[in-house]
Amino acid sequence: MAPVPMRRPGRAASMADLALPAWATGLPHHLPPGLLAPGAMAVAATELRMRAAFTDTPPASSRLPFSYQAIPGPLRRLLANGIGRLQRLRQAQWARYPGWPLDLSADIAADLAGSPGVTFARTPVLLTHDIDSPEGLRNLHRMFLPLEEAVGARSANYIVPCAWPVDDAVVQDLLARGHEVGVHGYDHANRTAFAEPTEREARLAAGHAFAQRHGGAGYRAPSLLRTRALIEALQPLYRYDSSIPTSGGAFPVPNNGCASARPWRFGRMWELPLSMPRDGSLRFLGHSPTGIGALWREVALRIAASGGIVNLLTHCEAGFSGNPPMLAAYRGFLEWAAADARFELMLPIELVNRLDRDWPPAA
Ligand SMILES: [Zn+2]
């Protein structure tokens, strides 16, 4: 059914005047002004999803002649914190589109078009970690897995395959305990997305060898730097990618994200949007661990109402979520989601198996 316009006296018709889906009430959005026929609205939905989906311009860190990870962690965090507090004051510039911390404009448009795509009555909750360092892998094993297993949950862990010696015994143990392993780029130098084809193929092949060794089916781009060329190169190698945030905020570049919390396909490969605000961004912006926990619950409820997926990324290093106050916020979120029948904690690979069953690729 076409949405019913409700004009107010003296105002031109705008999207604010349309009957938005009930779940979108009060959510900021960036829909085109005026009335659109369903066909045109479907085109707008795709345009909104892809408008800022890629990071076509490399940030400074990917142009450095050395890996930025060679900057000592505390100094890197200090720099990032200083930048973050300034960035919080400048939100109007880095969150023009998509908005922050949640923007579901593409999903609103898809519902208005009458072609919602993949939605869920019960909300999948994906717990994911990017494992950037040996410290991250140690902390994952020691601090995060027990919290997840205590609520019957398992996590997906995207490990940097070619920058430091990965402790295979730990990887084997987390697989044996039912967790998932995926690939986090090559060496986290933030170059793969922008490399020439030959170099990109070599980096992706090395990462894929790691995936094959551990049964990995998913990819997460370091720093979420992704280009169309990268996504195309991933398609023959992985069953899913999870590198595109719903609302990327200020990182890795201002105004990035897909404004959707619903999975979609690139070719045969699924894209699982990273729908929740990330621990790194929130800490950079100066939010307290308690505030982060509250924001996660609020955003998760909004996503649940919209029919999307809750896809949470936390980093296990002490400077991110591997410390007592952030672990308490994470545990609180896990216990809250596990106790609410609206949510269903699952692995990304389990979700992808279900999507392939229920949404087979076009012949
Ligand atoms: Zn990373």
Image (cartoon, rainbow, N blue to C red):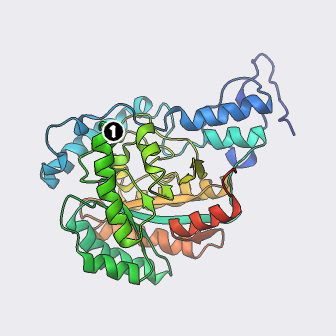
Location of the N terminus (image quadrant): top right
Residue at 47%, 47% (x, y): give it. Answer: 245
Regarding mark 1 in the picture, which secondary structure is present there?
helix
Percent of width and height locating residue 346: 54, 71
Q: Does any portion of residue 20 appear in the rendered image?
A: no
Q: Quadrant of ligand 1?
A: bottom left
- Which residue position is annotated with label 1? 197
Could you say which is closer to the camera, residue 101 or residue 60?
60
The residue shown at (36%, 79%) is 174
Q: Is residue 246 visible?
A: yes
How many discs appear?
1
- Which of the 4 image quarters holds residue 356? bottom right
In the image, residue 114 above or below residue 279: above
- Residue 336 screen position, x and y as percent: 53, 71
Judged left or right of residue 144, residue 46 is right
Three-letter amino acid code at the position of disc 1: Pro
